[in-house]
Image (cartoon, rainbow, N blue to C red):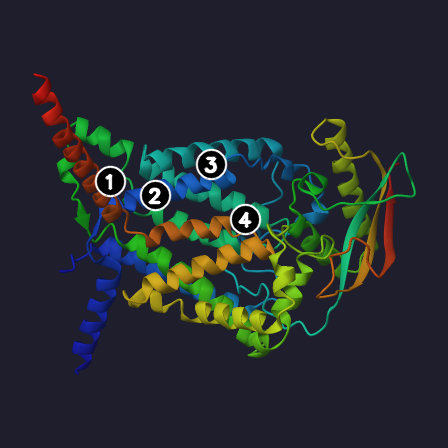
Amino acid sequence: MAVEPPSAPRRVTVLALVSVLIGGAVVAFVRDDPHGEDLWPFSAYRMYSFTLRTWRVSTHRVFGVPREDGRSEVPLMGRDDLYPIGHNSYYFTLRRIEQMRDPARLEAALRDTLSRYEARRRAGLHDGAPLRAIRLYELRWRLDPRGTPREVPDSRRLLLEVATP
Amino acid sequence: VSRGGFGARLRDAWNGFWFAPASAENLGWCRLLFFTGIFFFFGARDFRGFADVDGVFWNPVWAFRLLGFDQPSRLFLTIVQSVWRIAVVASCVGLFTRAATLLAFLTGTYLLGLLYSFGGSGSSTGIVVFVLASLALSRCGDAVSIDRWLRRRRGIAAATSASSGEYGWPVRFTWVVMAIAFFAAGLSKLRHSGLSWVSSDTLAILLVRVNHPLVRQANAPMFDWGLRLARHPWICRGFAAGSLAIELTFPLALFSRRLRPLIVSAALAMQIGIILVMGPNFGPFMLAYVFWIPWDRVMERLRGAGAKNAAAAVSREIPVTSGAT
């Protein structure tokens, strides 16, 4: 099939676009931030790239303490719990804040999470339980490849608690 | 081969790849389907809540930092979001397509960048920005659009050719974006893990992790099949080897017509499989698959089948009608 000669502006446009795409991809790959922060919209696509050698896993998760029952705790994982930030983005950002080792920032993050949850609940935007506090835990698990997934970890450690004023 | 000869061949190969004649209709359908998908994934999404989030979560992407963008106000987000929604709908139906696609690119890039500025886990949205850019710079509204219909009414549609080098490059550009994404993902696995990504229990462990509600990092998987797969380490290693092979060989789909359907179908099946058993949201990324389908030929076949059916129906009708009269 004969190739129609493109106009000069079109050639330049496509060349520029392709150069930006490939240049950005190379820079993103070479840089490959160890904390997983991409040069968005370019990416090193490191998701699931690391070898996992152990069935042990540790995660940090936020739990809400219901106002009516101070002894129970509910994990804040759903879309409405953390709105407008998605679950994955929320815990990614929380980990970044934790790595700053600045307790005031971490407390501000949890306090904001609690106040947004409560404000949306009072506005009738979700039907979660009223909370009097939220707690950040480190959870440790020993996963069983042949077992049923569990809600309860093998051990947990309280990292921080923030209560409503 | 002389230097001039090599340069000329290289230039011809470049022009042949990007500017081979393609139909306006194909690009028109790609535009319509891509923006339909964009509206499905982001049309109802309310971005205004980001104005109320504490600044401690604000971690702007490099471009926002470079341009000095602060965390936006609710009013600003209301305006940008409204423009985005109107631009996406107009781009979809092809109304004022040049302006609409440009606005969709600008507002879409901003809003998707905003999502990323509150948590760096959006590699599946990056591809959307590049596709939006290519459509904004192309003549994707020359067919399958209200603009085309209006031009025909005014009698100026003949000025637009049905096939031209102008209509192929946005499709090819999307192919290249996808090839880079897959190849980079494969390369990243080799870089960080080497072949142990395949030979270890990594995939089995991942499959178990995603089924633990408090452990997983993405959405819940649709099915718990991953737990059953994890009990068979060699099957997991086989899947790991297969996925790595698909990622690393995906660029071949750009150049080999014979391998293209095989590689692209395999990648699609892999991503669907990952969504089903592992949960991450590849939805926006997967919209780019519409650019691999030759919609002009699909429509031609459908029209041909429609015409055949109509002709068959008429031929069935005639004896009945003639017998009745």
Q: What distance separates the C-alpha of mark 2 from that of mark 1?
A: 11 Å
Q: Which chain carries label 2?
A: B
Please report the residue visible at 51 percent of the width from the left and 44 percent of the height from the top.
B110
Q: Report which residue position mark 1 lands on.
A: B142
Q: Report which residue position mark 4 lands on.
A: B113
Q: Callout 1, which amino acid?
A: Asp
Q: Mark 3 lies on which chain?
A: B
Q: Quadrant location of the N terminus of chain B?
A: bottom left
Left or right: B157 as drawn, with respect to A38: left
Q: What distance separates the C-alpha of mark 2 from that of mark 4?
A: 22 Å
Compare residues A31 and B247 and report the one nearer the observer: B247
Mark 3 vs mark 1: give the one in front. Answer: 1
Q: Earlier along the polypeptide chain: callout 3 or callout 1?
A: 3
Q: Callout 2, which amino acid?
A: Arg
Q: Using the rendered image, report if marks 2 and 4 lie on a common chain.
A: yes
Q: Report which residue position mark 3 lands on.
A: B84
Q: Furthest-top residue in view?
A: B325
Q: Earlier along the polypeptide chain: callout 2 or callout 4?
A: 2
Mark 1 vs mark 4: give the one in front. Answer: 1
Label 2 sits on a secondary structure element that is helix
Compare residues B97 and A128 and report the one nearer the observer: A128
Left or right: B135 as drawn, with respect to A140: left
Q: Callout 3, which amino acid?
A: Trp
Mark 2 vs mark 4: give the one in front. Answer: 2
Residue B316 seen from this side: yes
Q: Earlier along the polypeptide chain: callout 2 or callout 1?
A: 2
Q: Earlier along the polypeptide chain: callout 3 or callout 2?
A: 2
Q: Do the residues labelled 4 and 3 touch (CB within 8 Å)?
A: no
| Residue B290, percent from left and from top | 37, 49
Q: Are marks 3 and 2 in contact (CB under 8 Å)?
A: no
Q: What distance separates the C-alpha of mark 3 from that of mark 1?
A: 22 Å
Q: In this view, does A139 lie above or below A115?
A: below
